[in-house]
Image: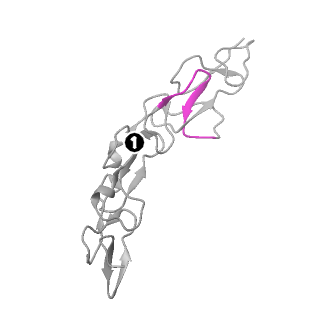
């Protein structure tokens, strides 16, 4: 099994693990893929097998560590990002699940939040991870909202309403 895709370990050769490669036959160690890149296959023989981290991810510190998702509430459109700081916080009323390449708007009748079970219909100013519908008795007529307004006395609304009637 002595080939460019394996590294020597004592008297036997082993396949280089994911996120690493051995460029020369008889290598004693595998070399980690550069930060901002990854490789899912075993036995890679060059850094050319290390692809760029996709948008919505970044390279984990240290050679050969691969890519990690941007946190929920942040996003990165950059391919090959190398730091968690390359993931930007979503603006007010916008949201992004973990690993998102972009932040998205919450539609009218919905609001941006991090809490999947909140009952007060007041969301997050920045860095939200999801959109929730406004509960009955509350409404929101705009995109990018961080909360829902209470219907005035004598008016009502169903869930996800854009106005009260």
Q: Using the image as rendered, state which of residue 9 and residue 46 is in the foreground.
A: 46
Count residues near mark 1 (Cα–Cα under 10 Å), then give few for <14, some for 14-19, many for 20+. Answer: many
The tally of labels here is 1
What residue is rendered at 53% in x and 24% in y?
A: 145
Of 13 and 55, which appears nearest the observer?
13
Position above or below: 74 against 7:
above
Residue at the image position 52 percent from the left and 39 percent from the top: 129
Instruction: State the residue at coordinates (55%, 35%).
Output: 113
Q: Quadrant of the N terminus?
A: bottom left
**Position of residue 132 measured from the top left corner of the image (x, y, whole percent):** 61, 32
Q: Is residue 46 left or right of residue 122?
A: left
Image point (39%, 54%), residue name: 67
Q: Nearer the viewer, residue 48 or 35?
A: 48
Q: Is residue 115 magenta?
A: yes
The quadrant of the rendering that contains the C terminus is: top right
Q: Compared to 120, does 164 lie above or below?
A: above
Residue that badge 1 annotates: 55
Query: Residue 99 appears at what percent x and percent y?
Result: 46, 45
Residue 150 belongs to magenta span: no
Give the residues in magenta: 104-116
Q: Residue 157: x percent and y percent?
A: 72, 18
The part of the image, by quadrant, that contains residue 55 is top left
Relative height, residue 48 to residue 96 (above, below): below
Residue 103 in the image: above or below residue 64: above
Tell me where residue 122 sits by quadrant.
Answer: top right
């Amino acid at each position: 099994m002595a080939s460019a895709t394996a590294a020597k370990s004592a008297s036997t050769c082993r396949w280089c693990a994911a996120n690493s490669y051995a460029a020369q036959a008889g290598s004693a160690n595998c070399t980690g893929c550069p930060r901002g890149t990854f490789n899912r296959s075993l036995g890679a023989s060059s850094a050319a097998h290390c692809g760029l981290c996709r948008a919505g991810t970044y390279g984990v510190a240290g050679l050969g560590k691969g890519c990690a998702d941007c946190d929920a509430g942040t996003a990165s459109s950059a391919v090959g990002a190398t730091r968690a700081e390359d993931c930007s916080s979503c603006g007010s009323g916008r949201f992004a699940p973990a690993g998102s390449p972009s932040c998205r708007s919450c539609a009218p009748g919905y609001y941006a939040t991090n809490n999947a079970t909140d009952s007060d219909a007041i969301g997050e100013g920045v860095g939200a991870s999801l959109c929730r519908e406004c509960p009955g008795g509350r409404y929101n007529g705009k995109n990018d909202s961080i909360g829902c307004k209470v219907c005035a006395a004598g008016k009502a609304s169903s869930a996800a309403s854009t106005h009260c009637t």
